[in-house]
Image (cartoon, rainbow, N blue to C red):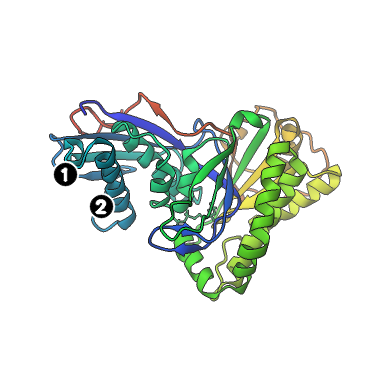
Amino acid sequence: MDKVVTCVAPVNIATIKYWGKRDEHLILPLNDSVSLTLDCDQMHAKTSVIAGPFIDEDSVWLNGQIMSIETNERLKKCFHLIRNLIKIRKGENSQESKWNIRVCSENNFPTAAGLASSAAGYACLVYTLANAFGLLDEDLPSIARQGSGSACRSIYGGFVHWKAGIDELGSDSTAIQIAADTHWPEMRIIILVVNDSQKKTSSTVGMKQAVETSELLKYRVQKCVPERTKGIIQAITDKNFEKFAEITMRDSNQFHAVCLDTYPPCVYLNQVSHDIISFVHDYNKAVGKIKVSYTFDAGPNAFLFIQQNDLNLFMSELVNVFPSEQPNSSYLRGIVSTLPYEVKPFGFKPKDKDLLKYIMVTKLGSGPRCVNDHLLNDDGTLKSKQ
Ligand code: DP6
């Protein structure tokens, strides 16, 4: 390989949450999950790869820092699985499987902000390696899954279903696309990044503790998730926003109830998260219809779903209730119109200023893709930033 290959991969947000593993080593989940893949234009991981006899050793640079592959089991596993796939496709003794690989990766959003950076990161690593070695096939979600479970869903665009499967080796635990992004082009996602410095239990640790101690998790896995998964796939197929929104909110609430049922409890939401939840319910009540829904991952940031026609009215009220000292140009990011947002349709009482860091509006995306803007030079050296 004498040319660098570079790809971008998106963040995905689960509406039916993955929480709990049946196999820690293979990263096999206890339950199915369903997610929406976001547009790479606003948020993405970007990875450049070069491999060849002229690269002296395997190395991975993440956001300007070198990572240790030896001590990072998940990274090591992804390299190993890609080399296995090269051998299967190109022969046991193929030269390419012996080449060292240099990887350089970056996120265009804060890694530690709790915005699913590991999902985008591992999906991008696996997708870029696969492109570099000409290995694009249906094995990619299974390899990405072994980097970080939720990463398998970022391999596809639109609406994605990660089937838990029952096979002990995980052959049937994979992601499939339910519908492309073009199926529901009016769908918008509003990300409310909450000002918070509290250190949280990682997803990996939190879900392990939940499996060991939560009774509610067992009920959720057996009873609630199968019904909700069926329901939300139907709602997506029918573009039934109200049904989609209600299932999404109920599943987020139950996931956080499981976190509280964990012993000792994992607390991911803070007061601002709860203020957002109340605001969404009050807003829907004022409008008389479910127009907007929320979901929260293992952190306090909110992901709201709304359709384009309802966006401007809701945004007016949102910036009224959660005001900022910053100018709108830095407070409101992404595909948001430059409206002054002075109308206060329902006149909810404003909260204190700067409870949110910023608000990002984005849409559905079509999944990972190759780009020409590389992070590495063809000789394997890192491109210096201008
Ligand atoms: C709350 O995929 O980060 O975002 O498999 O241990 O790497 P590991 O966990 P991870 O967990 C994501 C949990 C979640 C819900 C979801 O995305 O489905």
Q: Is residue 365 left or right of residue 353?
A: left
Using the image, determine if residue 266 lies above or below residue 111: below
Q: What residue type is labelled 2?
A: Ile
Residue 116, given in percent of the width and then of the height, sits at 49, 48
**Considering depth in this image, is 53 or 41 the residue closer to the camera?**
53
Image-quadrant location for residue 83: top left
Q: Does the residue labelled 2 lie within 8 Å of ligand 1?
A: no
Q: Which is nearer the N-term, disc 1 or disc 2?
A: 1
Q: Which amino acid does label 1 sit on?
A: Glu
**Residue at the (67%, 42%) spot, across then down:** 305
Q: Gap in Å between the C-alphas at discs 1 and 2? A: 11 Å
**Considering depth in this image, is 343 or 62 the residue closer to the camera?**
62
Which element is circle 1 on? loop
Quarter of the rendering occupied by the C terminus: top left
Task: Find disc 1 in the rendering and name its residue.
Answer: 57
Residue 140, given in percent of the width and then of the height, sits at 40, 41
Whether residue 322 appears in this view of the structure is no
Residue 359, given in percent of the width and then of the height, sits at 60, 41
Q: How many marks?
A: 2
Packing grade of label 2 (10 A; few <14, some 14-19, many >=20) is some
Task: Find disc 2 in the rendering and name its residue.
Answer: 69
Residue 79, given in percent of the width and then of the height, sits at 28, 47
Q: Is residue 125 left or right of residue 264?
A: left
Q: In this view, does 157 lie to the left or right of 49?
A: right
Q: Residue furthest top?
A: 372
Which element is circle 2 on? loop
- Mark 1 near mark 2, Cβ–Cβ under 8 Å? no
